[in-house]
Image (tube, rainbow, N blue to C red):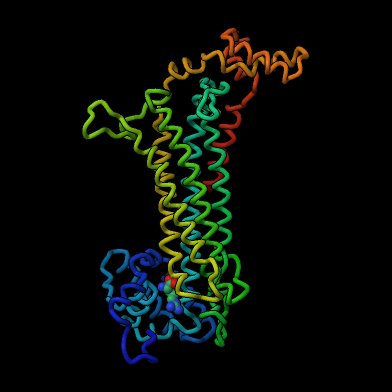
C-alpha cells in the first residue's frame, strides 16, 4: 500500500503491535458506504470513468457480502479494515487501484467513525426510549404506592414508588438529548481533507455528503482529520447513561434485599448461589452498577488520547476506537439489561406500606403544620426534634396524606414521559 518508498516490510512483531484490524473490523459497513460515496464523487469529478465506478461498486458490494457472511479472507499484512478492503478490491478489479485518489486513510477513518457514531447514537436513543417507557409504565402502575424516600439511606419523607421510578426516568431523558447532540456533532463530512491538507483533484464534496446523508461539510482540512469531539460527545453520553444505570442498579440491589424487601426479582432477572441453596441474587442490578466503569474508562481513555496531541493526524488516534467502542457497547448492553429488569420488577405493597407507616417520616409535615399556625420554622424544627428525642412525637397524618399534600404529580408526569419516549423512537 505504501511499498514504493520501502525495501523491506515492517517487523512482524511490530506489524502485530500496530494492527488495528481486531477492533476496527467493526467499521466495515461504514468503510464500504464511505468508499461507494467517495467513488461516486470521483466519477462526478471525472477522476474515474463510469465503467470504473461500476466495477468499484460491484467489487465493494461483493466485499460487503464476503464480510457479512464471514467468507472474507484476511491477510497478515492487512493493517486495518481500510487496507484489507482496498487490497481485496484491487484483487477483484483493476479499477480498485483508482479508488484512493484524493483520499487518505486519515479522512477515511474520520468519516467511518462519524458514520459509526451516528448509528450508535440512534440506537442508544431507541434503547433509552424503551427503558424510559418501562419506567414510565411501572410508575403509572405504582403511582399511589407509598414508600419511604431516603437521604443518606435513612428514612426521610414519604414518597411513592411511581415518583421514585420517575426520578430514574428523568436523567435518562437528559441522556437521550446527549445522544441527540452526539448524533448532530458527527454529522460533518470530512472527505476531501485528504491526509491533512486537501487535494488538488476537483472533488465535489457536496455530492459525497449528499450520498452519505450527512448534513454538513467539515470546514478545515486539518481539523477534519484531527477532530474526535463527536466521539467524545458520544462517549460522554454513554458514560452519563452508564452512571445513571449504576444508580438504578444500586436501588434495585437495596430494594431486593431482605432488609428492604420492597421488590421481588422475577426468576428471569435473578441468579442463585452455587453453594447456598436459599439465595436469590440481584446480579443483573449489580452488573449495571459494576459495568459503569467500562463506559467511564472508555471516555477517559479517549480523552487521554486527545490530550496534548499535535495537529493533524497522529497514529495515537487509532486508539480512539477500542476506547469508544467499549464505552458504547457497555452503554447499549446495559440499557437492554436495565429494561428487562425494570419490566419485571414486582413491588411488595405490604412491605412498602409497613416501611412507610413509620410515623417519623412525617416529622417534617408536623413542623410545617406549626409554621402554618405562625411558628417560625427554626422554632418548629426544634420543637418537633424534641418530641422525637423524647419519644413523644405524634404523627399529624399518615404517609398517604403526606404524599397527597405534597402534590408530587406522578400520574401526569408518567404520561408525559411516556409520550416523550414514544417521540424519541420516531
Ligand atoms: N488504522 C488507522 C487508524 O485507525 C488508520 C489511519 C492510518 N493512517 C496513517 N497515516 N498511518 O487511525
Give the total number of marks visible in the rendering: 0
Asked where in the image residue 263 lies, by quadrant, the reply is top left
167 sits left or right of 72 in the view: right
Asked where in the image residue 376 lies, by quadrant, the reply is top right
* Above or below: residue 106 compared with residue 348: below
Percent of width and height locating residue 372:
74, 15
Percent of width and height locating residue 330:
41, 51
For the point 42% across and 41% down, which residue is it? 289
* Above or below: residue 73 compared with residue 421: below
* Above or below: residue 86 compared with residue 138: below
Q: The N terminus lies in which quarter of the figure?
A: bottom left
* Above or below: residue 268 compared with residue 365: below
For the point 27% across and 65% down, which residue is it? 70
Percent of width and height locating residue 66:
30, 69
The answer to whether one can see residue 179 in this image is yes
Residue that protrudes farthest toward the right in the picture: 374
For the point 30% across and 29% down, which residue is it? 280
Q: Quadrant of ligand 1?
A: bottom left
425 sits left or right of 260 in the view: right
The answer to whether one can see residue 34 in this image is no
Q: Nearer the viewer, residue 87 or 291?
A: 291
Percent of width and height locating residue 175:
54, 47
For the point 43% across and 37% down, which residue is it? 249
Amino acid at each position: 500500500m505504501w511499498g514504493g518508498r520501502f525495501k523491506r516490510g515492517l517487523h512482524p512483531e511490530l506489524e502485530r503491535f500496530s494492527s488495528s484490524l481486531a477492533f476496527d473490523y467493526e467499521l466495515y459497513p461504514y468503510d464500504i458506504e464511505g468508499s461507494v460515496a467517495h467513488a461516486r464523487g470521483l466519477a462526478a469529478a471525472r477522476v474515474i470513468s463510469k465503467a470504473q465506478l461500476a466495477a468499484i461498486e460491484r467489487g465493494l458490494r461483493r466485499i460487503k457480502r464476503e464480510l457479512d457472511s464471514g467468507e472474507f479472507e484476511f491477510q497478515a499484512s492487512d493493517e486495518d479494515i481500510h487496507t484489507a478492503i482496498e487490497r481485496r478490491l484491487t484483487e477483484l478489479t483493476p479499477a480498485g487501484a483508482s479508488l484512493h485518489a484524493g483520499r487518505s486513510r486519515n479522512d477515511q477513518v474520520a468519516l467511518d467513525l462519524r458514520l459509526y457514531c451516528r448509528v450508535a447514537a440512534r440506537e442508544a436513543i431507541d434503547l433509552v426510549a424503551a427503558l424510559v417507557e418501562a419506567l414510565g409504565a411501572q410508575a403509572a402502575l405504582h403511582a399511589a404506592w407509598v414508600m419511604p424516600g431516603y437521604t443518606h439511606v435513612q428514612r426521610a419523607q414519604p414518597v411513592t414508588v411511581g415518583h421514585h421510578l420517575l426520578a430514574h426516568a428523568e436523567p435518562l431523558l437528559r441522556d437521550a438529548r446527549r445522544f441527540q447532540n452526539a448524533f448532530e456533532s458527527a454529522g460533518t463530512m470530512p472527505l476531501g481533507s485528504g491526509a491533512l491538507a486537501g487535494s488538488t483533484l476537483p472533488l465535489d464534496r457536496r455530492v459525497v455528503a449528499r450520498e452519505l446523508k450527512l448534513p454538513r461539510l467539515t470546514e478545515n482540512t486539518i481539523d477534519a482529520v484531527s477532530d474526535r469531539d463527536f466521539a467524545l460527545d458520544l462517549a460522554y453520553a454513554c458514560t452519563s447513561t452508564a452512571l445513571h444505570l449504576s444508580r438504578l442498579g444500586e436501588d434495585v440491589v437495596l430494594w431486593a434485599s431482605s432488609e428492604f424487601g420492597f421488590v421481588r426479582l422475577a426468576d428471569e432477572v435473578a441468579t442463585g448461589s452455587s453453594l447456598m441453596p436459599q439465595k436469590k441474587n440481584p446480579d443483573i442490578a449489580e452488573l449495571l452498577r459494576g459495568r459503569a466503569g467500562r463506559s467511564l474508562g472508555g471516555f477517559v481513555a479517549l480523552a487521554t488520547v486527545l490530550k496534548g496531541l499535535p495537529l493533524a493526524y497522529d497514529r495515537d488516534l487509532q486508539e480512539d476506537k477500542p476506547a469508544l467502542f467499549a464505552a458504547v457497547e457497555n452503554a447499549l448492553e446495559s440499557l437492554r439489561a436495565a429494561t428487562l429488569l425494570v419490566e419485571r420488577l414486582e413491588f411488595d405493597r405490604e412491605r412498602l406500606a409497613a416501611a412507610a407507616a413509620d410515623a417519623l417520616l412525617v416529622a417534617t409535615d408536623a413542623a410545617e403544620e406549626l409554621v402554618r399556625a405562625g411558628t417560625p420554622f427554626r422554632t418548629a424544627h426544634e420543637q418537633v426534634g424534641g418530641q422525637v428525642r423524647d419519644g413523644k412525637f405524634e404523627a399529624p397524618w399518615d404517609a398517604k396524606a403526606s404524599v397527597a399534600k405534597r402534590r408530587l404529580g406522578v400520574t401526569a408526569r408518567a404520561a408525559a414521559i411516556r409520550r416523550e419516549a414514544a417521540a424519541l423512537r420516531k
